[in-house]
Amino acid sequence: MFSTSIRKSKTWADAVPTLLKGPPFEWKEQQLEAYDIAFAVKTTSETESMFALVLLISSDVGSSSTTERVERLSLLNGGRDAAIVLLLTGDDSIVKLAQLQAETMNQNVVIPIIPITSVDDLRHRLDSLRRQRHQYLGKQAPPVLSNSDIVSHCVRGPPLSSMQTAYLIDLCTGFKDLTTNVFAPESQRVVRDFLGEVDGQRLIQFFTNGPMLAD
């Protein structure tokens, strides 16, 4: 299901016709308050819960209302069946993505963030997520991402090795510290020394120029 409020949004309204198209999954329009999109997932053979998603755009990040929404989302089912869809807009979209990741880490759990570059991508990403969750039916629920999982993927290209990620986490006091200092020339030199010239540059380019997004 998706919230009626999406229809009133200047950014997300264009996604409504696509959501209503039907197969492979049905998305019905309903009045939702705490989140924008939700679908039922079975936790066991006899019980089910609701997987909830909040839709944000880059300019939303950092506002008090967004912080409140993220906090509320983290309280649903312990934050396990929840995610944030972030539409990357503007020249500072990658900085905003990093800022949002840092903000979610201030919660008791790490809420996965699904970045998209176009509203047209929303339906496809939602269907993919729903398909993945159905694959876990009768199995152990997927683990919540750890800080190291996220940090290892904050590079252009393949993720950092576990040893490189550990070095990086030890080097910084936290993810927010990493995203703040990676823009300083002296900090960039330290990163290259720790990770090696090539991998250090891949991390720096991720934050300064953004990930290599598909066309």
Image (spheres, rainbow, N blue to C red):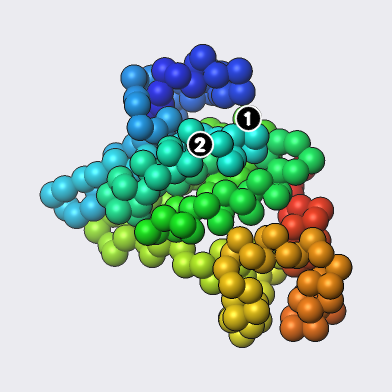
Give the amino acid type for the residue marked by disc 1 in the picture.
Answer: Asp
Q: Pointer 1 and pointer 2: residues touching (CB < 8 Å)?
A: no
Q: Nearer the viewer, mark 1 or mark 2?
A: 2
Residue 49 in percent (x, y) is at: 24, 44
Q: Above or below — where is 101 with respect to 118?
A: below
* Quarter residue 68 falls in: top left
Residue 134 visible to an observer of this rendering: no
Give the amino acid type for the residue marked by disc 2 in the picture.
Answer: Ser
- What residue is rendered at 71% in x and 36% in y? 89
Under circle 2, the secondary element is: helix
* Quarter residue 194 falls in: bottom right
Closest to the observer, 141 or 105 = 105
Q: How many marks?
A: 2
Residue 110 located left or right of residue 208:
left
Question: Quarter holding the C terminus?
Answer: top right
- What residue is rendered at 39% in x and 33% in y? 35
Closest to the observer, 136 or 24 = 136
Residue 149 located left or right of residue 184:
left
Residue that mark 1 sits on: 120
Which label's residue is closer to the chain start, 1 or 2?
2
Q: Above or below — where is 193 with respect to 60?
A: below
What is the crowding at mark 2: few (fewer than 14 residues within 10 Å), some, or many (at least 20)?
A: few
Residue 27 in percent (x, y) is at: 40, 27
Residue 198 located left or right of residue 75:
right
Under circle 1, the secondary element is: helix
- What residue is rendered at 43% in x and 30% in y? 36
Q: Residue 64, labelled with which disc? A: 2
C-alpha span from label 1 to label 2: 27 Å
- What residue is rendered at 52% in x and 52% in y? 103
Name the residue at the top extreme: 8
